[in-house]
Image (cartoon, helix red, strand yellow):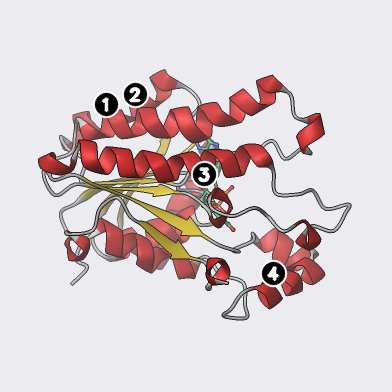
Protein backbone atom coordinates (compact mmCIF):
# COMPACT_ATOMS: atom_id res chain seq x y z
CA UNK A 1 0.00 0.00 0.00
CA UNK A 2 0.90 3.66 -0.48
CA UNK A 3 3.33 2.83 -3.28
CA UNK A 4 3.95 5.84 -5.53
CA UNK A 5 6.49 4.18 -7.83
CA UNK A 6 6.18 5.51 -11.36
CA UNK A 7 4.07 8.50 -10.34
CA UNK A 8 5.19 12.01 -11.27
CA UNK A 9 4.71 14.55 -8.48
CA UNK A 10 5.11 18.32 -8.29
CA UNK A 11 5.27 20.03 -4.89
CA UNK A 12 5.25 23.84 -4.70
CA UNK A 13 6.63 25.35 -1.51
CA UNK A 14 8.59 22.13 -1.42
CA UNK A 15 11.63 23.76 0.18
CA UNK A 16 9.67 25.05 3.19
CA UNK A 17 9.40 23.72 6.72
CA UNK A 18 6.61 21.27 5.91
CA UNK A 19 7.59 21.00 2.25
CA UNK A 20 10.83 19.11 2.86
CA UNK A 21 9.33 16.27 4.97
CA UNK A 22 6.39 16.13 2.58
CA UNK A 23 8.70 15.77 -0.42
CA UNK A 24 10.82 13.25 1.43
CA UNK A 25 7.71 11.21 2.17
CA UNK A 26 6.63 11.23 -1.47
CA UNK A 27 10.12 10.30 -2.65
CA UNK A 28 10.39 7.55 -0.03
CA UNK A 29 7.25 5.96 -1.49
CA UNK A 30 8.87 5.97 -4.94
CA UNK A 31 7.43 9.07 -6.59
CA UNK A 32 9.51 10.95 -9.14
CA UNK A 33 9.46 14.40 -7.62
CA UNK A 34 9.80 17.97 -8.82
CA UNK A 35 10.46 20.09 -5.76
CA UNK A 36 9.46 23.65 -6.61
CA UNK A 37 9.99 26.84 -4.63
CA UNK A 38 10.83 30.49 -5.26
CA UNK A 39 14.25 30.57 -3.60
CA UNK A 40 16.98 28.87 -5.64
CA UNK A 41 19.27 28.35 -2.65
CA UNK A 42 16.52 26.79 -0.55
CA UNK A 43 15.54 24.53 -3.45
CA UNK A 44 19.12 23.26 -3.81
CA UNK A 45 19.37 22.72 -0.04
CA UNK A 46 16.09 20.81 0.10
CA UNK A 47 17.08 18.55 -2.78
CA UNK A 48 20.40 17.83 -1.04
CA UNK A 49 18.62 17.06 2.26
CA UNK A 50 16.33 14.56 0.57
CA UNK A 51 19.08 12.94 -1.47
CA UNK A 52 21.24 12.61 1.64
CA UNK A 53 18.45 10.87 3.50
CA UNK A 54 17.35 8.82 0.48
CA UNK A 55 20.23 8.35 -1.99
CA UNK A 56 17.95 6.58 -4.48
CA UNK A 57 15.34 9.38 -4.44
CA UNK A 58 14.27 10.67 -7.83
CA UNK A 59 14.06 14.39 -7.01
CA UNK A 60 14.72 17.46 -9.12
CA UNK A 61 14.58 21.10 -8.02
CA UNK A 62 12.56 23.73 -9.83
CA UNK A 63 12.54 27.49 -9.19
CA UNK A 64 9.15 29.12 -9.72
CA UNK A 65 6.98 31.92 -8.37
CA UNK A 66 3.37 31.22 -7.42
CA UNK A 67 2.62 34.94 -7.66
CA UNK A 68 3.41 35.02 -11.37
CA UNK A 69 1.13 33.30 -13.89
CA UNK A 70 3.84 32.87 -16.52
CA UNK A 71 6.12 31.24 -13.96
CA UNK A 72 3.35 28.78 -13.00
CA UNK A 73 2.70 27.95 -16.65
CA UNK A 74 6.43 27.53 -17.29
CA UNK A 75 6.71 25.10 -14.37
CA UNK A 76 3.83 23.00 -15.68
CA UNK A 77 5.30 23.15 -19.20
CA UNK A 78 8.59 21.90 -17.74
CA UNK A 79 6.74 18.93 -16.20
CA UNK A 80 5.09 18.22 -19.55
CA UNK A 81 8.34 18.47 -21.50
CA UNK A 82 10.31 16.27 -19.10
CA UNK A 83 7.71 13.72 -17.95
CA UNK A 84 4.68 14.06 -20.25
CA UNK A 85 2.14 13.99 -17.43
CA UNK A 86 1.55 14.87 -13.76
CA UNK A 87 0.01 12.35 -11.34
CA UNK A 88 0.34 14.22 -8.04
CA UNK A 89 0.21 17.95 -7.32
CA UNK A 90 0.90 19.24 -3.81
CA UNK A 91 0.57 22.98 -3.26
CA UNK A 92 2.29 24.05 -0.05
CA UNK A 93 3.49 27.48 -1.20
CA UNK A 94 1.92 30.27 0.80
CA UNK A 95 2.73 33.74 2.01
CA UNK A 96 1.49 36.26 4.57
CA UNK A 97 2.10 39.97 5.13
CA UNK A 98 1.76 39.63 8.89
CA UNK A 99 0.39 43.04 9.92
CA UNK A 100 -2.46 44.02 12.20
CA UNK A 101 -5.84 44.45 10.45
CA UNK A 102 -5.66 48.25 10.80
CA UNK A 103 -2.22 48.43 9.15
CA UNK A 104 -2.73 46.16 6.14
CA UNK A 105 -2.95 48.02 2.81
CA UNK A 106 -5.13 46.94 -0.10
CA UNK A 107 -1.98 46.37 -2.18
CA UNK A 108 -0.50 44.09 0.48
CA UNK A 109 -3.76 42.18 0.85
CA UNK A 110 -3.91 41.63 -2.91
CA UNK A 111 -0.24 40.64 -3.14
CA UNK A 112 -0.81 37.85 -0.60
CA UNK A 113 -3.96 36.74 -2.40
CA UNK A 114 -2.09 36.60 -5.69
CA UNK A 115 0.14 33.85 -4.32
CA UNK A 116 -2.27 32.10 -1.96
CA UNK A 117 -5.50 32.16 -3.97
CA UNK A 118 -4.89 33.20 -7.57
CA UNK A 119 -1.70 31.15 -7.70
CA UNK A 120 -3.41 28.07 -6.28
CA UNK A 121 -6.23 28.36 -8.81
CA UNK A 122 -3.92 28.93 -11.79
CA UNK A 123 -1.70 26.05 -10.71
CA UNK A 124 -4.67 23.69 -10.35
CA UNK A 125 -6.03 24.62 -13.78
CA UNK A 126 -2.70 24.23 -15.55
CA UNK A 127 -1.92 20.97 -13.73
CA UNK A 128 -5.31 19.45 -14.58
CA UNK A 129 -4.44 19.62 -18.26
CA UNK A 130 -1.53 17.23 -17.60
CA UNK A 131 -3.33 14.89 -15.21
CA UNK A 132 -4.49 11.47 -16.28
CA UNK A 133 -7.36 9.59 -14.65
CA UNK A 134 -6.27 8.71 -11.12
CA UNK A 135 -4.49 12.05 -10.63
CA UNK A 136 -4.48 13.61 -7.17
CA UNK A 137 -4.25 17.27 -6.16
CA UNK A 138 -3.56 18.26 -2.57
CA UNK A 139 -3.82 21.89 -1.47
CA UNK A 140 -2.56 23.11 1.89
CA UNK A 141 -5.13 25.04 3.87
CA UNK A 142 -4.88 25.65 7.65
CA UNK A 143 -6.89 25.35 10.81
CA UNK A 144 -6.98 29.15 10.50
CA UNK A 145 -9.02 28.78 7.32
CA UNK A 146 -11.76 27.32 9.55
CA UNK A 147 -11.48 28.99 12.93
CA UNK A 148 -10.09 32.32 14.11
CA UNK A 149 -6.73 32.55 15.86
CA UNK A 150 -7.13 32.94 19.63
CA UNK A 151 -5.57 36.37 20.41
CA UNK A 152 -4.57 35.14 23.88
CA UNK A 153 -1.95 32.91 22.23
CA UNK A 154 -0.18 35.75 20.43
CA UNK A 155 1.07 37.85 23.33
CA UNK A 156 2.63 41.18 22.13
CA UNK A 157 5.20 41.95 20.83
CA UNK A 158 4.30 38.79 18.94
CA UNK A 159 2.30 39.53 15.79
CA UNK A 160 -1.14 37.92 15.43
CA UNK A 161 -1.75 35.28 12.80
CA UNK A 162 -2.85 37.65 10.03
CA UNK A 163 -6.26 38.03 8.40
CA UNK A 164 -5.12 37.77 4.75
CA UNK A 165 -3.65 34.35 5.52
CA UNK A 166 -6.77 32.84 7.09
CA UNK A 167 -9.06 34.30 4.43
CA UNK A 168 -7.00 32.69 1.67
CA UNK A 169 -6.84 29.38 3.54
CA UNK A 170 -10.65 29.42 3.80
CA UNK A 171 -10.84 30.02 0.04
CA UNK A 172 -8.72 26.91 -0.57
CA UNK A 173 -11.36 24.80 1.20
CA UNK A 174 -14.05 25.94 -1.22
CA UNK A 175 -11.73 25.65 -4.21
CA UNK A 176 -11.03 21.97 -3.52
CA UNK A 177 -14.77 21.20 -3.22
CA UNK A 178 -15.53 23.06 -6.44
CA UNK A 179 -12.71 21.48 -8.42
CA UNK A 180 -13.37 18.00 -6.99
CA UNK A 181 -16.81 18.19 -8.58
CA UNK A 182 -15.55 19.89 -11.73
CA UNK A 183 -12.91 17.24 -12.49
CA UNK A 184 -14.50 14.28 -10.70
CA UNK A 185 -15.81 12.59 -13.84
CA UNK A 186 -12.29 12.76 -15.27
CA UNK A 187 -11.09 10.76 -12.28
CA UNK A 188 -9.03 13.60 -10.85
CA UNK A 189 -9.28 13.95 -7.08
CA UNK A 190 -8.83 17.27 -5.28
CA UNK A 191 -8.37 17.35 -1.50
CA UNK A 192 -6.95 19.63 1.17
CA UNK A 193 -4.74 19.20 4.19
CA UNK A 194 -5.37 21.64 7.03
CA UNK A 195 -2.38 21.66 9.36
CA UNK A 196 -2.73 22.88 12.90
CA UNK A 197 0.03 24.16 15.18
CA UNK A 198 3.33 23.17 13.55
CA UNK A 199 5.47 26.24 14.23
CA UNK A 200 8.82 26.47 12.51
CA UNK A 201 12.03 25.51 14.30
CA UNK A 202 12.84 29.20 14.85
CA UNK A 203 9.68 29.58 16.95
CA UNK A 204 10.35 26.32 18.70
CA UNK A 205 13.80 27.55 19.73
CA UNK A 206 13.00 31.22 20.32
CA UNK A 207 9.48 31.32 21.75
CA UNK A 208 9.24 28.52 24.33
CA UNK A 209 6.27 30.11 26.14
CA UNK A 210 4.35 30.41 22.88
CA UNK A 211 5.04 26.75 22.17
CA UNK A 212 3.75 25.84 25.64
CA UNK A 213 0.56 27.84 25.05
CA UNK A 214 0.01 26.06 21.72
CA UNK A 215 0.64 22.63 23.24
CA UNK A 216 -1.71 23.32 26.16
CA UNK A 217 -4.54 24.21 23.76
CA UNK A 218 -4.02 21.06 21.65
CA UNK A 219 -5.96 17.95 22.67
CA UNK A 220 -2.91 15.75 21.97
CA UNK A 221 -0.89 18.00 24.29
CA UNK A 222 1.95 18.83 21.91
CA UNK A 223 2.70 20.90 18.84
CA UNK A 224 3.07 19.05 15.54
CA UNK A 225 6.44 18.38 13.90
CA UNK A 226 7.23 18.34 10.19
CA UNK A 227 7.17 14.56 10.15
CA UNK A 228 3.51 14.59 11.24
CA UNK A 229 2.47 15.87 7.80
CA UNK A 230 4.06 13.46 5.31
CA UNK A 231 1.81 10.47 6.01
CA UNK A 232 -1.33 12.49 5.37
CA UNK A 233 0.05 13.72 2.05
CA UNK A 234 1.17 10.25 1.00
CA UNK A 235 -2.30 8.88 1.81
CA UNK A 236 -4.07 11.51 -0.29
CA UNK A 237 -1.52 11.16 -3.11
CA UNK A 238 -1.78 7.39 -3.28
CA UNK A 239 -4.38 5.09 -4.80
CA UNK A 240 -5.31 4.05 -1.24
CA UNK A 241 -7.44 7.22 -1.15
CA UNK A 242 -8.94 6.56 -4.60
CA UNK A 243 -12.51 7.16 -3.32
CA UNK A 244 -11.69 10.31 -1.35
CA UNK A 245 -12.26 13.67 -3.01
CA UNK A 246 -13.32 17.18 -2.03
CA UNK A 247 -12.29 16.51 1.58
CA UNK A 248 -10.13 18.27 4.11
CA UNK A 249 -7.82 16.16 6.22
CA UNK A 250 -7.18 17.90 9.54
CA UNK A 251 -3.64 17.34 10.82
CA UNK A 252 -3.86 19.42 13.96
CA UNK A 253 -3.56 17.28 17.08
CA UNK A 254 -7.30 17.72 17.56
CA UNK A 255 -7.18 21.56 17.73
CA UNK A 256 -10.55 22.06 15.97
CA UNK A 257 -12.54 19.41 17.88
CA UNK A 258 -13.31 21.42 21.02
N1 LIG B 1 3.64 25.29 9.77
C1 LIG B 1 2.40 25.44 10.21
O1 LIG B 1 2.16 25.51 11.44
C2 LIG B 1 1.24 25.49 9.27
C3 LIG B 1 -0.04 25.53 9.83
C4 LIG B 1 -1.13 25.59 8.99
C5 LIG B 1 -0.95 25.61 7.63
N2 LIG B 1 0.30 25.56 7.10
C6 LIG B 1 0.43 25.58 5.65
O2 LIG B 1 1.31 24.57 5.25
C7 LIG B 1 2.02 25.01 4.08
C8 LIG B 1 3.51 24.88 4.33
O3 LIG B 1 3.84 25.67 5.45
P1 LIG B 1 5.31 25.76 6.04
O4 LIG B 1 5.17 25.79 7.50
O5 LIG B 1 6.18 24.76 5.39
O6 LIG B 1 5.72 27.23 5.58
P2 LIG B 1 7.11 27.73 4.96
O7 LIG B 1 7.03 29.22 4.98
O8 LIG B 1 8.25 27.10 5.66
O9 LIG B 1 7.05 27.19 3.48
C9 LIG B 1 6.34 27.83 2.48
C10 LIG B 1 7.19 27.77 1.25
O10 LIG B 1 6.49 28.44 0.21
C11 LIG B 1 7.44 29.15 -0.52
N3 LIG B 1 6.79 30.27 -1.21
C12 LIG B 1 6.29 31.39 -0.66
N4 LIG B 1 5.84 32.20 -1.62
C13 LIG B 1 6.06 31.56 -2.80
C14 LIG B 1 5.86 31.92 -4.14
N5 LIG B 1 5.33 33.11 -4.48
N6 LIG B 1 6.22 31.04 -5.11
C15 LIG B 1 6.78 29.86 -4.77
N7 LIG B 1 7.02 29.48 -3.50
C16 LIG B 1 6.67 30.34 -2.54
C17 LIG B 1 8.46 29.65 0.49
O11 LIG B 1 9.70 29.96 -0.13
C18 LIG B 1 8.53 28.49 1.44
O12 LIG B 1 9.60 27.62 1.14
C19 LIG B 1 1.59 26.45 3.83
O13 LIG B 1 0.59 26.46 2.85
C20 LIG B 1 1.05 26.87 5.16
O14 LIG B 1 0.10 27.88 5.03
C21 LIG B 1 1.41 25.51 7.89
Q: Secondary structure at mark 1?
A: helix
Tag 1–tag 2 contact (CB < 8 Å): yes
Q: Secondary structure at mark 2?
A: helix
| Residue at position x 59%, y 78% in the image | 219
Q: Earlier in the sequence, mark 1 or mark 4?
A: 1
Q: Secondary structure at mark 3?
A: helix
Q: Nearer the viewer, mark 3 or mark 1?
A: 3
Residue at image mark 2: 74
Q: Earlier in the sequence, mark 3 or mark 1?
A: 1
CA–CA distance in space, label 2 to label 3: 25 Å
Residue lying furthest bottom? 221
Q: Earlier in the sequence, mark 4 or mark 3?
A: 3
CA–CA distance in space, label 1 to label 2: 5 Å
Classify 216 as above or below 230: below
Find residue 151 and report its image quarter.
Answer: bottom right
Residue lying furthest front? 258
Q: Nearer the viewer, mark 1 or mark 4?
A: 4
Q: Earlier in the sequence, mark 2 or mark 3?
A: 2
Residue at image mark 4: 214
Residue at image mark 3: 169
Q: Nearer the viewer, mark 2 or mark 3?
A: 3
Q: 188 left or right of 202?
A: left
Q: Earlier in the sequence, mark 2 or mark 4?
A: 2
Residue 4: image x %, image y %?
A: 20, 60
Asked whether mark 3 lies closer than 8 Å to ligand 1, one says yes
Q: Nearer the viewer, mark 2 or mark 4?
A: 4
Q: 185 left or right of 67?
A: left
Amino acid sequence: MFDLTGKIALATGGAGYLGVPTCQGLAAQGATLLLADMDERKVAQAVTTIKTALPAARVEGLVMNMGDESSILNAIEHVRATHGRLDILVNLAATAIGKYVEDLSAAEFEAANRVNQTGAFLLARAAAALMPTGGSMIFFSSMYGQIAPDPALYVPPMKPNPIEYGMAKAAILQMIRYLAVHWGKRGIRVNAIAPGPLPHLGFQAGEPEFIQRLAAKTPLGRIGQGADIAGAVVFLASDESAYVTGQTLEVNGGWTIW
